[in-house]
């Protein structure tokens, strides 16, 4: 680092700008494909109803352009297409060829556009990686353009994001379930995580000592390593290469642990975003000049000071006994608190939705609806979807953890009885090929991965046992 200019972080800047923009492409594509059946005008939780309810209560929603522009599904599509287009140009590096205010305006447009969606996304957008993407997009707006090095203050703010993300998650685990302290958490996690991937079963079947090592490695990567991300700051006072090297090694450890999670799970863009953000600490001598326009130094300095002020609640939260997880302390969803899996589910319960066209539900031929990501058919190999986010499948995982069925799930069953085409497109397979079932019901099962011996006999990757009929057969009146 060289004073106000992070001259050795040009490579980091390129990865941050293009990587964050690529994640915005994924986020807008996910929204384009799923928002309308989930939250559109005829969605399971219609966003227009929320906006109408919130209209006289102006401060109850986070900022959204749909407060001033009436929501329609067509306008939602237009917003997504525009967002995909802007993000794609940033991935290609075109705005970065101009003055720094050009990529700034592009990233701020992505931030405002996606916040307009998450603000009305209700439970389908209630995930920590939504606010993480918003915060990353806002800070990316101040990384500048190719004809100048990035500002030191902005690079340090990216380290602050990674620190909150990793150290916050580490503290949540230590303060959370006993399984993180007795090193047993990952003997369950690969099997019970929300959406297993194709290698999750192989990871689950690894020896117990390996899982204990995973937990220890996780604690080291999340509780110790994040502190060393700030080591390059010492380069401002020490004329040596070792501070930058320490920061690069710390970033490499974060990236390596996140890649293991990518290989063994499906956590939407959480792991990919962490990987991209961790590159902010990777220094690569470029020999570039250190000329930064004065007006840009002023802008980035003001951003840094403002961020320091609004970061106080998040910093205080890290030290709090009752630490909040994935919490925002302001309406703009900046300087947030992060964390994941403070406790690990030890048993996997799946809700299987079935339908029949028979008149007598007691003697009916029941057929299962197949979801794209969540377990169903015991022989099917789980697929990789991340960084793409299957919102319906994720909320199906959360259902057994609650005390009652949620409003959206009741609406979902009604849509299945109506054979609603847009809802059926969220699924992997409709057993009735677009025709209406007469009845639907919900059956709960316990799922576990098959052992190697069981797999050799049955070729099934899951073993399941039926628990009970959770929702008795229901039909549309008339």
Image (cartoon, grey):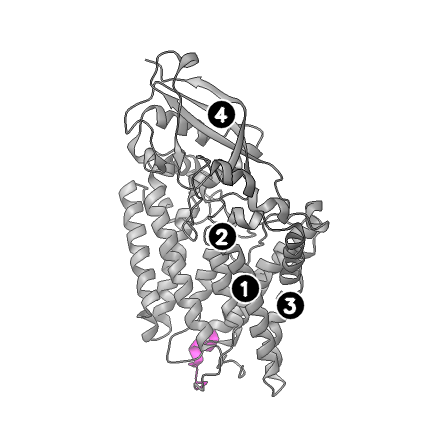
227 left or right of 288 in image: right
Secondary structure of the residue carrying tag 4 is strand
Q: Earlier in the sequence, mark 4 or mark 2?
A: 2
Instruction: Identify the mark at residue 199; answer none if there is no mark.
Output: none
Instruction: Identify the mark at residue 256; answer none if there is no mark.
Output: 1
For disc 1, the neighbor class at 10 Å (few under 14, some 14 to 19, many from 20) is some
Q: Is residue 49 above or below residue 276?
A: above
The residue to which callout 3 is attached is: 227
55 left or right of 211 in image: left
Q: CA distance from mark 3 to mark 2?
A: 22 Å
383 left or right of 223 in image: left
Q: CA distance from mark 4 to mark 3?
A: 47 Å
Q: Which residues are magenta?
A: 289-298
> Depth-wise, is mark 1 or mark 3 nearer the camera?
1
In front here: 16 or 469? Answer: 469
- Regarding residue 257, the answer to whether it shows in the image is yes
Inspect the magenta stretch and tell me whether residue 108 lies in it: no
Q: Quadrant of residue 450?
A: top right
């Amino acid at each position: 680092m060289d004073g106000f200019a992070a001259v050795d972080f040009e490579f980091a800047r390129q990865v941050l700008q293009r990587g964050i923009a690529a994640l915005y492409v994924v986020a807008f594509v996910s929204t384009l494909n799923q928002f309308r059946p989930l939250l559109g005008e005829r969605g399971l939780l219609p966003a227009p109803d929320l906006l109408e309810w919130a209209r006289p209560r102006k401060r109850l929603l986070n900022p959204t352009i749909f407060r001033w522009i009436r929501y329609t599904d067509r306008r939602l599509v237009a917003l997504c297409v525009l967002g995909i287009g802007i993000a794609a140009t940033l991935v290609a590096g075109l705005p970065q060829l101009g003055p720094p205010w050009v990529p700034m305006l592009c990233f701020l447009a992505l931030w405002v556009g996606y916040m307009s969606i998450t603000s009305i996304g209700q439970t389908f957008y209630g995930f920590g990686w939504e606010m993480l993407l918003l915060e990353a997009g806002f800070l990316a707006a101040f990384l500048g353009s190719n004809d100048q090095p990035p500002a030191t203050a902005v690079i340090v703010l990216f380290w602050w994001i990674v620190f909150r993300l990793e150290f916050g998650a580490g503290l949540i685990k230590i303060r959370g379930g006993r399984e993180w302290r007795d090193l047993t958490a990952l003997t369950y996690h690969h099997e019970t995580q929300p959406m297993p991937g194709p290698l999750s079963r192989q990871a689950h079947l690894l020896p117990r000592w390996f899982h204990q090592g995973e937990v220890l490695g996780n604690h080291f990567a999340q509780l110790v390593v994040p502190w060393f991300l700030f080591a390059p700051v010492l380069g401002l006072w020490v004329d040596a290469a070792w501070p930058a090297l320490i920061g690069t090694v710390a970033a490499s450890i974060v990236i390596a642990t996140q890649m293991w999670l990518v290989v063994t799970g499906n956590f939407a863009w959480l792991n990919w975003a962490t990987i991209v953000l961790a590159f902010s600490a990777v220094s690569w001598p470029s020999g570039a000049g250190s000329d930064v326009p004065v007006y840009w130094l002023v802008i980035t300095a003001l951003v840094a000071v403002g961020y320091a002020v609004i970061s106080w609640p998040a910093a205080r939260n890290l030290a709090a006994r009752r630490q909040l997880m994935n919490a925002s302390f302001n309406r703009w969803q900046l300087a947030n608190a992060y964390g994941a899996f403070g406790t690990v589910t030890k048993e996997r319960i799946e809700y299987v939705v079935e339908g029949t066209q028979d008149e007598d539900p007691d003697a009916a031929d029941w057929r299962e609806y197949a979801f794209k990501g969540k377990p169903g058919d015991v022989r099917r190999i789980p697929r990789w979807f991340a960084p793409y986010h299957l919102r319906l499948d994720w909320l199906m995982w959360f259902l057994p953890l609650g005390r009652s069925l949620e409003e959206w799930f009741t609406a979902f069953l009604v849509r299945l009885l109506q054979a609603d085409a847009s809802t059926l497109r969220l699924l992997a397979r409709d057993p009735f090929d677009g025709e209406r079932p007469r009845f639907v019901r919900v059956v709960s099962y316990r799922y576990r991965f098959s052992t190697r011996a069981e797999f050799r006999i049955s070729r099934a990757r899951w073993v399941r046992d039926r628990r009970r009929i959770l929702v008795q057969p229901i039909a549309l009146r008339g």
